[in-house]
């Protein structure tokens, strides 16, 4: 299957069924300060549907945690019930950019990526029966496709040419879920997806961690010493940097959209001097030979993927949960805000598993006139934090209520079960682990 592209999802907007809106009965309509184009209802929960859902998830979780023991046999996504009350933590504070997304920070691919799928090749999701459709970035054989299969066994994986297309596929009901990488143990964070999480209104409903075992693939008969070029996803290139320098020092590296797409490109264009870093499955799919197996720089190479949906899940307390938030604070509110935020978790014994900062695109720079010493410029940031607690827990609700006091906006991206599957590093093989 060819990959779904952003432009085709945009064209489909007029064809897909819009998400149902919350009832407006009895509510006063007000313009949102951050989003003048949007309306919200002061006596209802949330300024817009996604906020409303996040708030409802928290409210519902409070009801669950107070009134009844959590149900057994979790894992499935449950749609949050609406209870019509105002959230204790108001989550309607995030400015959303309305402009088209800027160009990716990833350098433009040198080889042409696989041709994007025409939208007419996809049936909109509401008609597709019982099989869950899961959008991922890449083409068949990509690690993200494998992650989609791990997250949702027996799903129909829907390839998308860009991360943004995967978000849109879910928003436009072409897919039911998206599975997207956010961080890798060697390459670090996939910043693009952090930015897109904020720009779009999907909810994190789960996570999966996948060991990533890379191979160096080329046309049958190719030789390592004759390679002039190695192409792959930028993350994969960075995860294999030292190994490739060691085994093919003469080869230049070029970034393309995904690992399996690199393999497909070599096969389609019969490129004898080029190799791809991709999975063994990509070698099988595109008829390539494995020149070196296990070319990642460390055998403990693992990528964490998030599962995204239109609806949040109701947080529970019968299994370990993680919650992801994003916040920003006003520069004028004094120093130590980050310290105060972190202490709100520390005092409640809540462990943080990740903290990430990204430029605050709506307000990138703060000017500070510091007495007679001139005007100082500070960069402004959005902070993303993952913590080990469920929003169904009172300590997490209290921590967030406190965080809200220190911040100018705050959004819960999702409260979801932690991936607890046992993991062991991939065995060392011919190519990798040489350092
Ligand atoms: O190109 C792929 O195969 C992907 O699924 C993308 C991706 C990533 O973005 O990190 C996923 C897992 C690996 O870390 C390498 C690449």
Image (cartoon, rainbow, N blue to C red):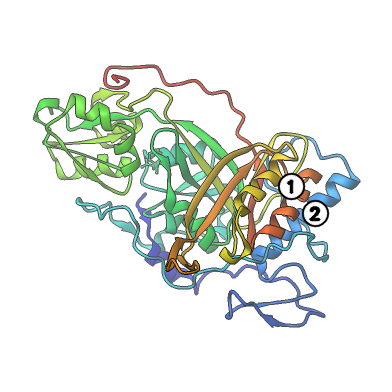
- From this view, report whether residue 349 is shown above or below residue 299: below
- From this view, report whether residue 180 is shown above or below residue 154: below
Q: Quadrant of residue 37?
A: bottom right
Left or right, 230 with respect to 429, comes to: left
- From this view, report whether residue 372 is shown above or below residue 179: below
Q: Residue at x 73, y 34 (%)?
A: 319
x and y, in percent, of residue 51 in the image: 67, 64
Report whether the residue tagged 2 is closer than 8 Å to ligand 1.
no
- Residue sitting at the far front: 372
x and y, in percent, of residue 404 in the image: 70, 58
In terms of depth relative to the viewer, which is nearer, 374 or 384? 374
The crowd level at tag 1 (other Cα within 10 Å; few <14, some 14-19, many 20+) is: many
The mark closer to the camera, 1 or 2, is 1
In terms of depth relative to the viewer, which is nearer, 94 or 294? 94
Q: Which label number is shown at residue 391?
A: 1
Q: CA distance from mark 1 to mark 2?
A: 10 Å
Q: Which label number is shown at residue 28?
A: none
Report whether the residue tagged 1 is closer than 8 Å to ligand 1.
no
Quarter of the image for the C terminus: give it: top left
Left or right, 280 with respect to 420, comes to: left
Which secondary structure lies at badge 2?
Answer: helix
Q: Quadrant of residue 54?
A: bottom right
x and y, in percent, of residue 53 in the image: 70, 61
Q: Residue at x 47, y 54 (%)?
A: 358
> Dot 2 corresponds to which residue?
60
Q: Residue at x 17, y 32 (%)?
A: 219
Specify whether residue 255 is in view.
Answer: yes
């Amino acid at each position: 299957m060819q990959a779904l592209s952003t432009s085709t999802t945009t064209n489909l907007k007029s064809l897909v069924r819009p998400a149902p809106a919350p009832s407006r009965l009895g509510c006063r309509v007000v313009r949102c300060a951050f989003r003048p184009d949007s309306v919200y209802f002061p006596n209802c929960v949330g300024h817009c549907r996604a906020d409303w859902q996040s708030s409802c998830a928290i409210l519902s979780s409070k009801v669950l945690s107070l009134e009844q023991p959590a149900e057994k046999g979790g894992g499935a996504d449950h749609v949050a019930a609406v209870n019509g009350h105002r959230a204790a933590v108001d989550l309607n504070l995030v400015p959303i950019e309305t402009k088209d997304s800027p160009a990716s920070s990833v350098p433009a691919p040198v080889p042409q990526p696989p041709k994007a799928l025409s939208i007419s090749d996809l049936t909109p999701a509401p008609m597709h029966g019982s099989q869950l459709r899961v959008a991922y970035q890449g083409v068949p054989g990509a690690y993200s496709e494998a992650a989609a299969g791990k997250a949702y066994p027996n799903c129909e994986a829907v390839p998308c040419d860009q991360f943004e297309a995967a978000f849109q596929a879910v928003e436009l009901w072409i897919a039911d879920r998206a599975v997207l990488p956010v961080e890798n143990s060697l390459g670090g964070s996939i910043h693009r997806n952090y930015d897109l999480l904020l720009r779009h209104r999907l909810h994190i409903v789960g996570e999966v961690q996948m060991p990533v075992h890379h191979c160096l693939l080329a046309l049958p008969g190719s030789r390592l010493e004759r390679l002039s070029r190695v192409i792959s996803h930028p993350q994969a290139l960075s995860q294999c940097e030292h190994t490739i320098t060691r085994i093919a020092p003469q080869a230049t590296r070029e970034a393309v959209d995904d690992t399996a797409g690199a393999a497909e490109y070599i096969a389609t264009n019969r490129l004898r001097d080029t190799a791809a870093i991709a999975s063994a499955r990509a070698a099988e799919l595109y008829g390539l030979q494995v020149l070196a197996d296990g070319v990642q720089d460390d055998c403990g190479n693992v990528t964490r993927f998030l599962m995204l949906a239109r609806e949040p899940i109701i947080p529970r307390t019968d299994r370990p949960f993680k919650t992801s938030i994003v916040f920003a604070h006003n520069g004028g509110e004094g120093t130590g805000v980050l310290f105060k935020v972190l202490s709100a978790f520390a005092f409640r014994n809540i462990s943080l598993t990740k903290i990430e900062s990204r430029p605050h695109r709506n307000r990138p720079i703060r000017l500070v006139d510091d007495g007679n010493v001139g005007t100082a410029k500070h960069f402004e940031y959005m902070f993303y934090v993952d913590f080990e607690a469920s929003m169904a827990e009172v300590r997490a609700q209290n921590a967030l209520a406190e965080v809200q006091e220190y911040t100018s906006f705050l959004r819960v991206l999702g409260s979801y079960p932690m991936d607890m599957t046992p993991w062991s590093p991939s065995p060392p093989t011919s190519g990798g682990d040489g350092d």
